[in-house]
Image (cartoon, rainbow, N blue to C red):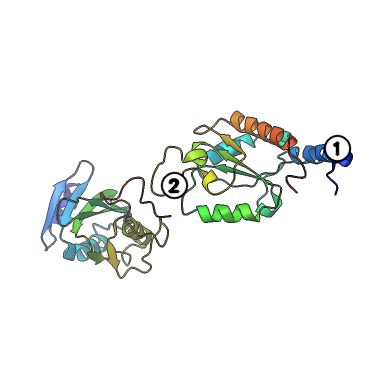
Amino acid sequence: MGIESHLGIITTSLDKVVNWARKNSLWPMTFGLACCALEMMVTASARHDLARFGAEVFRGSPRQADLLIVPGTLTKKMAPYVIKLYNQMPEPKWVIAYGACACSGGLFNTYNVVQGVDKIIPVDVYVAGCPPKPEALLKAIVMLRAKIEKESLKDRV
Amino acid sequence: MENIKDLVCQYPSKIEVKEGIDCLTILIDKKNLYDFLKFLKNDERLNFNMIVDITAVDYPEENPRFELVYHIFSISNNVRIRVKTRVEDGGSIESVTSLWKGAEWLEREVFDMFGIKFNNHPDLRRILMNEDFKYYPLRKDFPLQGIEES
């Protein structure tokens, strides 16, 4: 598919359509590690409705999801399984590190905690807080949508 | 509380009885421990039929190093009792899984965190750390941040 300049108008319009479709239907995976998972569940419930941003369902299987929200502390025992689940997700996929423990190990600089989930998988948006308010997760989804809008098909399939 | 203490003090082996803040504390030798716990469980009036917790305390200056603490509870009498014993570093002690099934994972946790081995345990392996972890984390000489390996 030509990405040369004279076909640029087609590819940028295609980019816009594809990015619009992707950002309006981000389906997360049910993946809760610790206390921040409760805040994630609250965000998906009626008061702070996550579904109005397109996250209609939380898929149980990684093969059907495109967003991995990592809430909670990542221990060294769980780390190989997070990598396995991340690899099982099909492209395009995004990751939100939700909470202080997922961003950097949080309070726990100890022998069994991975100091941040970005040590094992690439992260797109970091949300700080212990736990972050549900509004912070909604702001993270909005930031992720703005990031997706700037993507292009030639960078990612 | 008083009659429990009298019943317990009738035990033939040497035990030391102390009144703790919340319940009675018994200090006993490692080799008499299993029989004493069996007596506590099987006696009709004492009837300590529930294991609440098994844990250990590391006193690195003293020898024997670890103090193993059992908390057991009697549902029919609604009374708790604490049994303490001393185990040395690298030593092992009889498992109480044959008395209380719930002790299986509690003893696995003590083995994982302190390195105290239990004889006749049905499945003694690490429960919280990785299977191939080389150290025992809750000992006083293990650093909080852990040991950098990989």
Is A129 situated left or right of B26 in this image?
A: right
Residue A113 numbered tag: 2
How many discs appear?
2
Image quadrant where residue B133 sits: bottom left
Residue A144 seen in this snapshot: yes
Kind of element beneath mark 1 = helix
Q: Chain of mark 2?
A: A
Is A16 situated left or right of A116 in this image?
A: right
Q: Chain of mark 1?
A: A
Report the amino acid beneath label 1.
Ser
How busy is the neighbourhood of tag 1: few (under 14 within 10 Å), some, or many (20 plus)?
few
Report the amino acid beneath label 2.
Val
How busy is the neighbourhood of tag 2: few (under 14 within 10 Å), some, or many (20 plus)?
many
Is A6 situated left or right of A76 in this image?
A: right
Q: Is residue A74 above or below residue A53?
A: below
Q: Nearer the viewer, residue A2 or B83?
A: A2
Q: Position of residue B50 (x, y in %)?
A: 33, 56
Q: Quadrant of the C terminus of chain B?
A: bottom left
